[in-house]
Image (cartoon, rainbow, N blue to C red):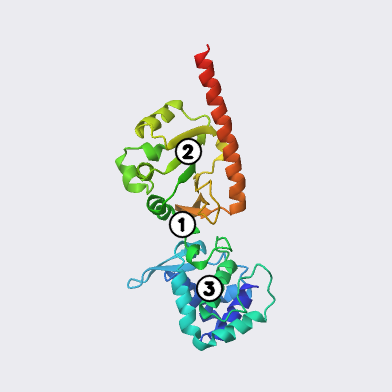
Amino acid sequence: MTFGDFIRAVHTGIPSLNLYSLTAALFHAANSGIIIKPTTAKNWLKSNGKYLSYQKLFINRDPDLRIDRESDIVSIYKNFDDNTFLDYLKKQAGKLWKTMQSSFALLDRDESDEIKCDTNNEVDFYKSVLLQFKLIIKYPYNKNDEPSALSSTFQLYKDLAIMERRDPFDEIWVVGHDFSIDVSNNTSAKLTNPYYGVLKHNLKRKIKYKYFVPEAINKNDIEDAYRHFEYDNNFTIYACLPKTFIPDLGLTIYEPNKTKDEGRKCTVGVWVEGFGGTRTPYAIFMPDDELTHLISELTRYMKLHSSRCEDDTDAQANP
């Protein structure tokens, strides 16, 4: 299904707008801070979405002062509002939702498409339209996620930090270049890094943490970390990874010993380029099949590390 196919099918349920206005309205419903220029909407439709990533959008910072700035498609991902998008479809289409559904049914579709053309549930149909829209604009999400979970697929670090501090977990694995933020007493870190204090808080909740860091890390730093957390038995450091194994912003695995249905998931830190060369740390979820392989690799490194530690202990005991 192409971008043009999608817009024209939705248009049969919302015929009061022309195709260009409807395109702009859908993006505005997805993110109220986005204003699509008519020429941009026209180019997108004529190219069947080919130039979707390259056309500039206007983000209105202050409607009263009419101060706008340009950004790109990534700006939509940051604050995609599922509920507003769904409400817009329901309000605008009204009784014509079945007409829209029939139009989608006439299109050439493949197994990757999300539209539910056989459902009699209006809400389920609109949710499938939402999923298809995100698929069309290449929103970074797992297609098996439900709409209610999509907003968490491309998240700011602060949202994940809140989740990690709040939700019940049995075990968390962290892969990073160090653990300086977790042991820091720096005031500025407390104010600027959302993860400050999360580990200490969760150790009090008896959550087990395993930290995987580079094998070349300073051993004194490891001892300082253990001392900082008073040698808590739920906190273990494995200095066993090659630096090339670790992503720039690290990754976190929640419930590594459980299944996906039981809450297992992994977030990988990524930089998102913004206006003026600014960069914001976000996180995306790793597909579960890739996560299974990652856990297997980390378990292998963990066993190697434990074996080396035993050898070192034996060597010290028997010089």
Q: Residue at x 49, y 43 (%)?
A: 173
Judged left or right of residue 296, residue 57 is: left
**Label 2, label 1: how far apart the Cα atoms are:** 22 Å
Q: How many marks?
A: 3
**Label 1, label 3: how far apart the Cα atoms are:** 20 Å
Count neighbours of disc 1 (C-alpha within 10 A) and say few if under 14, some if 14 to 19, many if 20 or more: many
Q: Which residue is mark 1?
A: 155
For badge 3, the amino acid type reads Lys
Find numbered disc 3 in the image and state the secondary structure of the residue it sits on.
helix
For residue 101, above or below residue 173: below
Q: Residue at x 67, y 79 (%)?
A: 107
* Residue 311 in picture, x, y percent from top left: 56, 21
Closer to the camera in the image, 179 or 120:
120
Q: Which residue is mark 3?
A: 127
* Residue 3 in picture, x, y percent from top left: 61, 73
Q: Residue at x 51, y 88 (%)?
A: 95
